[in-house]
Amino acid sequence: MSRNGITRRQVLRNGAGVFAAGALGAPMVHAQGTGGTIRCGFWDHWVPVGNNAIRELCAEWGTRNRVNVQVDFITSVGNQNLLTIAAQAQSRSGHDILSFPTWEPASKAEMLEPVDDVMGRLTQKYGPVNAAAEYLGKIGGKWVAIPAVSGTQFKPACVRFDLMEQHAGIDIRAMWPAANQRGPGAENWTWDTLLAAAEKCHAAGVPFGIPMGSFSDAVDTVGCVFAAYGASVMDARGNVTVQGNAKLRQAVEYMVRLSRFLPNDVWAWDDGANNRALISGRSALIFNPPSAWAVAKRDAPQVAEKCWTVPPPSGPEGRFTPYLPYFWGIWSFSRVKPAAKALLEFMSERTSAEKMTTTSNGYDIPPFVSMNDFAVWANEGPPTGTIFNYPIKPHHNATASVAFAPAPAEYAVQAYQQGLNTKTIARISQAGETVDQALGWLERELNTIRRGG
Amino acid sequence: MAADGSLAMSGTAGVSAGRANSLQRFARRRSTIAFVMTLPLLVVIVGLVAYPAAFGIYLSMLNRRMTAFAGTLNFELLFESETFWMVAFQSCFFAITAVLLKASIGFWLAHMLHHIPNNRQRKWRGMLLVPWVIPPALSTLGWWWMFDPSYSSINWLLSIISVPEVPWLGHHWWARIAIIMVNVWIGAPFFMIMYLAALKSVPEQLYEAAAIDGATSWQRLRYVTLPMMANIISITVLFSLIVTFANYDIVRVLTNGGPRDLTHVFASYAFQVGILSGNIPRGAAVSLFMFPILAICAFFVLRSVTRRNKEQM
């Protein structure tokens, strides 16, 4: 080869150069387009067809933007979603977009990509999100995750209107008709009215199914009663406000009275027990999203057609509806942040939100107050309009409530997961402690949480 | 073996060994070979035991956000918490009661089986092992349905004979009993099979000699069977104590620690504090409390086993 003036070494060197130049200059080719791949881990919906809308929306956006969108659905059964979040946060690898349950955005705030730009555009378009979503998703003045549609729920009262009328003399459908207006007597729908009705229904053998354990339905319901009485146990700066708190004492005493008219075993109820109490026809009222009614529609239609969802009663400080949102967050270690933001913005659009809510039979609640008028809530039945009052409507004059707000999220989540509010009631009603003893215990537990940071 | 500890070679191999350099001599040493052969085990122990344990200790010394070293703060806070001491009491109560019951029932079942002729023993062994073979999460779910606060099938059966409803999961003492019952139901077959194997290994001549001496059945049990089974009983109890102490699924499925945290054990409480409440360092601190308690138990049990072995030698 050297006879031609070209050495083997030169050939190899030039060949390597050509190969490197070709590799560097080659276009980035992906399976579907040139926009790369977004890996999403969304919450696996309770409603069997609930995932379809997300799947379709991701496919639609992916095709339009030539991006490959991989979608996984992660169940919350057995806290698989929490374990996934913890593992990905620890390893700093995994999905780009993940569904974060209520308290997780605050917990992982430092590892999430701020989404103020997306939220700015969305609020400009659709108005404000509800205050509870802002409390949970806006940490240190920055939106760290976008309040999601899929999985987000309210927990208003689901009432057996026939039993309520028969035993307590309350025509709940007349009070809260399937229309954007209050009916006669709606102003009397207070926690005191509910207490009187609870006593009558208890005597009639159809007690209200309000759980008092440490699962979320119990903590949320007691949380909304506390909020209605203006009873907070910790202020926004993290100061424990138990001692000398007259409103808290009033709320606790109310819950103790109410618990006397609940089934004996509510202290052991999980999140499914209240649903079963309603579906089996043994309870006249529960606080739950429409999933209990939806199951009754399938398994006990004679019960479902007598259910009517209404806002929770009001207290001295107003009406508060328990709210349990999901969030969509983007990990800071994601390499496709702009595309992930664009996808989430598309999924938060009104048309996308309505598609998700409709597919889930009205279960999913959009975060924007202006979207609480989707047709699905008026059309679902039987009876038609049964979940009309499921989302907060202007005439409800209600506020979305998260138990233990306005405490800083890092403290509130610990109090929430340990069910400190329901345990306070249980210590009095079940263990026979005095109100002072129970509140003393609550104060000590909150101080321990606060000291631990 | 050569004076330097390397393996002896013969013939031409011995000649070549003489020329071997120091690296080859090092590779041929018995200690080196032993080390190399135990290396896979060491890797497993370091990777799956030492590293997680060290990482757990490291985690427990961080602040909640895991951004700064917090020293012993998490442990101090736990010591001050009423709930934690309640959990410590429940863990010990649950583990000790459940293990004693499992050991007693397993011992009794093993004796019953031992006296059944061999050809009929197999089907009984199979049936009695079923609770141990079913995945605990699944069988616990079945028990949960039976204890269900509102629709308990056990209560329904009790109502037939006019026994009032039992709040299986709603009252803390009943809930504790329910958890122990399920654990015993799952774990007793393990004791049974271990004790049955031990019983079969007791020489028949010892019983014959005891019979000639006029020993009663109680004396045969006390002076022949129990001493011969002592090591198996100790090791089985220790093993079961460790597993029962770290039990998580039964509490999680049946009561989730309720009512009022009165059925939480270390593992379920650590999960609640660490994963659900987003305080992984505190959760790690809770779970680390199992270690000293179990280490003390293991020390005394293994020491008694060693002593017995020495006495028998």
Image (tube, rainbow, N blue to C red):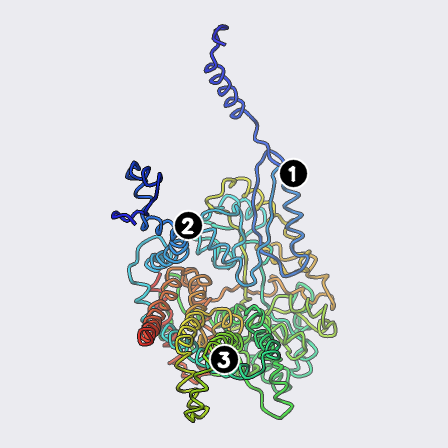
Image mark for residue A64: 1
Image mark for residue A90: none
**Mark 2 element type:** helix
Nearer to us in this view, A313 or A453: A453
Label 1 in the same subunit as label 2: yes
Inter-mark Cα distance, 1 to 2: 32 Å
Please tell me how crowded label 2 is: few (under 14), some (14-19), or many (20+) other residues with Cα within 10 Å.
Answer: some
Give the chain letter at badge 2: A
Residue denoted by label 2: A110
Residue B177 lies, in percent from the top left, at 49, 82
Residue A130 lies, in percent from the top left, at 54, 57
Nearer to us in this view, A292 or A12: A12
Image mark for residue B106: 3
Instruction: Tell which circle, 1 or 2, labels the residue nearer the N-terminal end.
Output: 1
Nearer to us in this view, B76 or A308: B76
Which amino acid, mark 1? Arg
Residue B269 lies, in percent from the top left, at 43, 69
Residues at badges 1 and 2 in contact (C-beta under 8 Å)? no
Image depth: mark 1 or mark 3 in front: 3
In the rendered view, would you say B159 is above or below A297?
below
Is B158 left, or right, of B79 in this rendering? right
Which amino acid, mark 3? Gly
For the question of whether residue A368 can be seen, the reply is no
Which quadrant would the C terminus of chain B be assigned to in this image?
bottom left
Is A258 left, or right, of A302 in this rendering? left
In the rendered view, would you say A260 is above or below B29?
below
For the question of whether residue B272 can be seen, the reply is yes
